[in-house]
Image: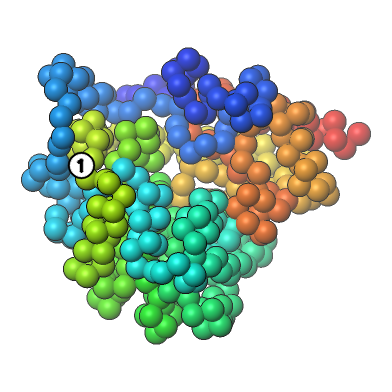
Amino acid sequence: MTDFNFIHNRKGTNSLKYDFAAERGKSKDLIPLWVADMDFPAPEEVITALKEKAEHGIFGYSEPDEKYFSALYNWLLSRHGWETQPENFVVTCGVVFSICALIRAITKVGDAVIICQPVYYPFAGSVTDNGRRLIVSELKEENGYYTVDFDDFEKKIIENDVKAFILCNPHNPVGRVWTREELEKLGDICLKHGVFVISDEIHSDFVYGENKHIVFPKIKSEFEDICAVCTAPTKTFNLAGLHIANTYVKSDIVRGQLKNELEKQGYSQPNIMGLVACRAAYEYGAKWLEELKAYLTQNLQLVREYASNKLGGIKLVEPQGTYLVWLDCRALGVADEELSALFEKEAKLWVDDGFIFGKGGSGFERINIACPRSVLKQALENLSAAVRRLSK
């Protein structure tokens, strides 16, 4: 049984989360609950596999082999009922990297790409930094529950001749796990108007309760050729620094375009340690993941309890998936700058301000609950005290 309560000292390890506060204009005494990595070591089997590779001592150019793809196949089939073929995958160094490469591969400079905000903030940059036009269809929120505004989504596609859509499922930061009906409706609109879907499914292994993650191309066979699915073990097993991702593209044409784009960027073989860790995680990490999800469920309950009676009107947006929690702070009645200061200066927390996820994130904050419970409890106590001082 993994001891997720143990506090591992990450300071002095080149950790973005812990060691670069000053470089990002933050005080060094903040509790970091921002960037989406976890404060837990990877499964022991992953660490052992990495040690064995390190002891071999040769780190030359490497490619994924049959055993790698077998581990990937078995994981996706057992966890998501998704049967895949090795030839449909392109292995890259990360999901955001894949999204950017796909945008360049399937659209031209000046083309429109649509996203549904509030959403993972690198999506917007992936579009604009590559010279494409960003089109936003805002999610609808009612009593803490988010849905897609399908009429607006289709209207924006038609008006702007949109060429691609970046889907986030499970959705970061609002925590929705989209239903089959919702995904089918999105897919039908995109199919009707010739919009290619880039589906970011990196959080797919974190789904709670009765909710079920549905891989986008599984909805309809017609969706297979109009989508790419971006997957990775990095969020699931805390491997982000090893830079490994598996991008599924069924269309031979689009997959060829993606590979051509990677060649133009000078990218070829993936990180050998990423390959080793991914295979080991998918072969042996299931038990560790179930223990982790049980622990995160208890962490979520702690946030729920504080939000119910100790946070002065701050509401928990109930997540159906991910370990990133969306807090509705609008009842505090403060502007975004003041809200940011409340969390950082008063509560001594480093979190992600809601407005960076888009206009609809104004008045919200995102926190990462993948940390030891004592750390999370201290953070919530700090926030509770800060809110009490605000109300005086």
The quadrant of the picture occupied by the N terminus is top left
Q: Position of residue 236 (x, y in %)?
A: 36, 40
In the displayed structure, 381 sits above or below 275; it is above
Residue at x 17% of width, y 26% of height: 59
Residue at x 32% of width, y 33% of height: 242
Q: Is residue 298 left or right of residue 29?
A: left
Label 1 environment density (alpha carbons within 10 Å; few <14, some 14–19, many ≥20): some
Q: Which of the pair 386/51 is nearer the observer?
A: 51
Q: Is residue 313 left or right of residue 113?
A: right
Q: Which residue is mark 1?
A: 269
Image quadrant of residue 106?
bottom left
How many numbered dots are placed on residues in this image? 1
In the displayed structure, 148 sits above or below 72; it is below
The quadrant of the picture occupied by the C terminus is top right
Q: Position of residue 40 (x, y in %)?
A: 41, 26
Q: Position of residue 99 (x, y in %)?
A: 39, 56
Q: Is residue 322 left or right of residue 274?
A: right
Image quadrant of residue 29?
top right
Q: Position of residue 220 (x, y in %)?
A: 29, 75
Residue at x 21% of width, y 63% of height: 256
Q: Which of the pair 44/277 is nearer the observer?
A: 277
Instruction: Say what amino acid the circle numbered 1 marks.
Output: Gln
The local secondary structure at tag 1 comes to: loop
